[in-house]
């Protein structure tokens, strides 16, 4: 099978999984490109950031239009993530590949544990949160809410942006808890607003990779196209599928991939 | 920070920018990729984006598409700033412009300090 087709299929898979599970897809794209295609980690991270921009902007367009994402909050916190992403992207150029692989393995373990915890608590969360009506005229978030501790949240957003620029992920695993737990916004606002911010964050992180010459456009193109198509397909499927078994499967995949990345970090 | 309800015009402007921008840039990447496949262009390899834009039709299209996608959030923030300004929300318009300028600044910093790999 031609390598172009394999790259596109990998992007398709990552995009579909990402849309089904509410992820940017970076946690899959980076390991696929490094472990599956032998790309240098910095090239995989740069490609992943471009893919994350595409998935974020496509999903954010729908969320903003439906009134599900808080644009004011997203733009304000975007200041913190943008600076963090630039510093992360610049730093990645100076860190040895094995250090990046080790950090990525740690991030994957954290993501897997977070998803597993969410899966175990999902029944209780659904029962505790008010029902969401996406067809409501003002979107599901019409009741006003007040967010708290903005300076602390911007500082935390800087950390999320740093992780994004350094490892090529969206940074949602940091920004969602910040918006929900630190700022006390409803969970759905946290998820959709984080997704809106991810475009800003990934763009800031991608500039260092694009201009440093880490990215091979001929390799990145089929992955980006696959992710774009996979994202649309995943979003269409998400309404019809129960994703709980997918989360379980994904946690297993993350566990395996984190082990492989850890081996790469140890072997150098 | 208090949420003050939705604004369909502002939201529609931002959503349209994101939707059209994504479609347009992904289409440019797809055309560039198709041209590369049809002409057998192996690509310029891992080179800075600035070099890519001057390296043949396929590479130029791919480079333009990737650059366009990465610049899309700046365009979106500009549209948001205009929307906030029209609503009389000077503070949010300023924040939007500030974050857009921050992204422009990160681009300048990346051009200036990014160490070639």
Image (spheres, rainbow, N blue to C red):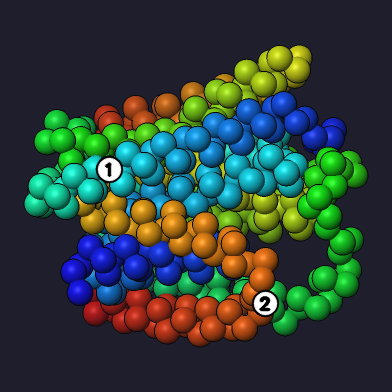
| CB-based contact (under 8 Å), mark 1 and mark 2 | no
**Where, quadrant-wise, is the C terminus of chain A in this rendering?**
bottom left
Which image quarter: residue A197?
A: top right
Q: CA distance from mark 1 to mark 2?
A: 36 Å
Give the structural element (helix, strand or loop) at label 2.
Answer: loop
Q: Looking at the image, which residue sits at the far front?
A: B38
- Write the residue at 55% across / 71% down: A111
Disc 1: which residue: B31
Q: Is residue A130 left or right of residue A56?
A: right
- Write the residue at 87% across / 61% down: A131
The answer as to whether the residues below labels 1 and 2 share one chain is no
Nearest to the eye among marks 1 and 2: give it: 1
Which image quarter: residue B14?
A: top right
Is B63 placed above or below A128 here? above
| Residue B97, percent from left and from top | 57, 22
Give the structural element (helix, strand or loop) at label 1.
Answer: helix
Which image quarter: residue A6?
A: bottom left
| Residue A163, percent from left and from top | 48, 55
Q: Residues within 10 Å of mark 1 (few under 14, many from 20)?
A: some
Q: Is residue A79 left or right of residue A8?
A: right
| Residue B40, percent from left and from top | 9, 52
Which is more toward the observer, B75 or A153?
B75
| Residue A164, percent from left and from top | 47, 53
Residue under mark 2: which chain is it in? A
Q: Residues within 10 Å of mark 2 (few under 14, many from 20)?
A: few
Residue under mark 1: which chain is it in? B
- Write the residue at 45% across / 41% down: B23
Which is more toward the observer, B6 or A26?
B6
Q: Is residue A43 visible?
A: yes
The label shown at residue A242 is 2
């Amino acid at each position: 099978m031609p390598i172009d087709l394999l790259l596109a299929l990998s992007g398709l898979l990552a995009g579909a999984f990402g849309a089904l599970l509410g992820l940017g897809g970076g946690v899959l794209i980076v390991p696929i490109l490094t472990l599956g295609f032998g790309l240098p980690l910095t090239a995989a991270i740069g490609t992943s950031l471009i893919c994350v921009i595409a998935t974020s902007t496509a999903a954010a367009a729908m969320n903003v239009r439906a009134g599900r994402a808080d644009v004011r909050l997203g733009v304000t916190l975007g200041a913190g993530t943008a600076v963090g992403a630039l510093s992360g992207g610049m730093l990645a150029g100076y860190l040895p590949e094995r250090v990046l692989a080790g950090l990525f393995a740690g991030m994957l373990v954290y993501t897997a544990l977070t998803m597993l915890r969410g899966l175990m608590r999902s029944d209780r969360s659904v029962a505790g949160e008010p029902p969401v009506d996406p067809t409501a005229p003002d979107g599901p978030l019409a009741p006003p809410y007040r967010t708290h501790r903005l300076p602390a949240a911007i500082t935390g957003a800087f950390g999320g942006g740093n992780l994004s620029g350094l490892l090529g992920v969206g940074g949602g695993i940091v920004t969602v808890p910040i918006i929900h737990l630190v700022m006390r916004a409803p969970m759905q606002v946290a998820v959709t607003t984080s997704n809106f911010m991810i475009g800003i964050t990934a763009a800031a992180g991608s500039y260092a990779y694009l201009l440093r010459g880490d990215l091979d456009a001929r390799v990145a193109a089929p992955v980006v196209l696959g992710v774009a198509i996979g994202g649309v397909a995943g979003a269409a499927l998400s309404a019809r599928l129960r994703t709980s078994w997918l989360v379980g499967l994904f946690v297993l995949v993350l566990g395996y991939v984190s082990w492989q990345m850890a081996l790469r970090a140890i072997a150098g | 920070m208090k949420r003050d309800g939705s604004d369909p015009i502002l939201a529609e402007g931002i959503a349209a920018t994101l939707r059209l921008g994504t479609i347009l840039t992904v289409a440019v990447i797809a055309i560039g990729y198709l041209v590369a496949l049809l002409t057998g262009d192996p690509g310029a390899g891992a080179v800075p984006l600035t070099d890519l834009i001057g390296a043949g039709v396929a590479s130029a299209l791919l480079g333009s598409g990737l650059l366009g996608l990465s610049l899309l959030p700046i365009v979106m923030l500009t549209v948001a700033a205009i929307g906030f300004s029209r609503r009389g929300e000077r503070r949010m318009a300023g924040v939007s412009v500030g974050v857009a300028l921050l992204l422009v600044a990160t681009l300048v910093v990346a051009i200036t300090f990014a160490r070639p790999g």
